[in-house]
Image (cartoon, rainbow, N blue to C red):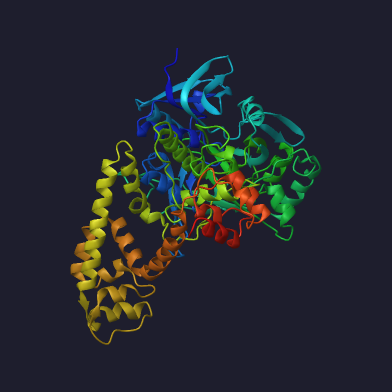
Amino acid sequence: MFPHYDVIVVGAGHAGCEAAVAAANMGSKVLLVTMNMNTIAQMSCNPAMGGVAKGQIVREIDALGGYSGIITDHTMVQFRMLNKSKGPAMWSPRAQSDRMLFAAKWREMLEAHDNIDFWQEMVTGLIVKDGICSGVKTGIGLEINAKSVVLTNGTFLNGLIHIGDKQFGGGRAGERAATGLTEQLVELGFESGRMKTGTPPRVDGRTLNWDVMELQPGDEDITGFSYLDTPKPETQVPCHITYTSPEVHELLKEGFDRSPMFNGRIKGLGPRYCPSIEDKIHRFAERERHQLFVEPEGRNTCEIYVNGFSSSLPEDVQYAALRKVPGFEEMKMFRPGYAIEYDFFPPTQLDISLETRLVSNLFFAGQINGTTGYEEAASQGMMAGINAHLKINEKDPFVLKRSDAYIGVLIDDLVNKGTKEPYRMFTSRAEYRILLRQDNADLRLTSLAKDLGIRNIEERVTRVEAKSEAMRTLKKSLESISVSPDQLNPYLESINSTDLNQKVKLISVLRRPNVSLVALAEYLPDLKTTLEAMDPAHVESTEIAIKYEGYIVKEQEMANKMNRLESVLLKNDMDYGTLSALSTEAREKLTTQRPRTIGQASRISGVSPSDISVLLVHMGR
């Protein structure tokens, strides 16, 4: 009934979709197995992509040939570049998506791929023999063979939904939980745990008073996510902001005794940086109000997502409290918020390729690894799909260093440090964030995708080459142009910058704080003509590279020093137990986690600098 597949991907959320596309674009024949074909790429929580650090991840996925950026651009209803008041290392694109169009576009692009097949059913087990995974078992007793398997089960593994004192099995509202896999993996020797996440209520936008809320429009200039020429919306749908109040908090507190968070029914740890509304009130009791973002679910629906009001309180408490929020006085609710507990597997059980150490040819990606967020999941899925293909073709794994990409930071953190609560990416987690900007993901990564042989990468490579050449040409031009005081002093005075007293090179003026290349062009007609002929994104990237050149060089030097340790490979069969100079904890951690390099070993919790010195001496370094 089934052919023999190269890669089976279990789960069709953000991780599963990117995993299927990545393996298929590498040339593998892929089967994507999902419990419900109608919920492929479902946005289970907020209808948005990107945000702080997450936007950088989406651009990195796009630069490597993934689809998340393309689909977001096709289906966005609003775009904003966050943190523009800060330095460019902090700029983060974010798009409000049309939830239904987003899922439909993903399915359309998946179905158009000739290397991807589909099967709708629950996977209840794996085919494992002699420590090698060679397929999956389904709920109706089918066995489907493959050379490798990628598990991207999201919140479905033994999922348990909580609303007040009610609880019932489910992987998402209206969908059943997945059973069987956790039990088998534990029998195989894997350690499992429980995590918790939640989602806010959805309400009827026709019943809200928008006039009393703060308007939050999109940017006039829509950059988007994909480096390809994707469509952008001609009109945008605004979001709004409102606030809770002491009265709202008192009403919510009345339900605390029925909250599964406070009465012990929820055992899993929730996301620290995206707490429920009851958790906010409990932890930040001194605050009189909390911000709520009122977000549209799409262009042609009245359904509204109340971002900031995630809750597992009883539905009647949620309803009563929400009706005291400004603008929500006549609100009608579509469905209450809820919390969900699910199984995950500590990611320290994985190699840096996302292959499990206990079972060969088995890969984990997404929330099964303890992460939270569409973007974190999608990037893991892409990397797992690529590495599943490389593994079965006996090629070295594709590994991104911490200085290469936020994706590299994410996977390195997970595998070497692990996580005890849902992991979310922030710019602060990346020590090389000046290098890892959202504007240069294509310059950093597309050549790597080319070397991997990813399908249909040629247009991206051509665009990167054109961008690189445009940036070099513009920089040379700025280095050669001399400007006089009479040309630029009026502009410099307008921004309170020191006047020129002699001719200088234009590039030296651009390096000043608050000086803009586009603004300079208003005083220099030839420069204005040059910029108007260029892609604005190329102009922006050139300006950033020039202004922050000193910082970029220093950070690259730091990265190069650390990367020397990444080139020192550790033997997979090294007997750390015989190295008595290592600390006891280091011997245990190194034996368990089997780092590939000295650099990776240095980031394992419990391995000290002196332990690294011992390893280097042992290796004759």
Left/right placement of residue 313 relative to residue 541 reads right
Does residue 611 appear left or right of residue 510 in this picture?
Answer: right
Residue 357 pos. (x, y %):
56, 37
Query: Can residue 208 be seen by looking at this rendering?
Result: no
Does residue 138 appear anywhere in the picture?
yes
Could you tell me which residue is drawn at 32 percent across and 38 percent down? Answer: 453
Vertical relation: 32 (above or below) 58 = above
Observer-nearest of 193 and 506: 193
Give the side of residue 438 with respect to residue 230, left or right.
right
> Outermost residue, top direction?
1
Up the image or down, 592 lies above or below 557; here it is above
Indicate the position of residue 128 as horizontal and vertical percent values.
56, 24
The image shows residue 538 at horizontal and vertical percentages of 29, 57
Residue at image location 79% in from the left, 41% down from the top = 264
The extreme bottom residue here reads 501
In the rendered view, tell whether residue 128 sits above or below residue 542: above
Q: Is residue 480 left or right of residue 311?
A: left
Is 396 above or below relative to 400? above
Q: Quadrant of the N terminus?
A: top left
The number of numbered badges drawn on the structure is 0
Residue at (34, 43) in percent of width and height: 449
Q: In the picture, residue 550 is in which quadrant?
A: bottom left
Residue 182 point in image, percent of width and height? 64, 30
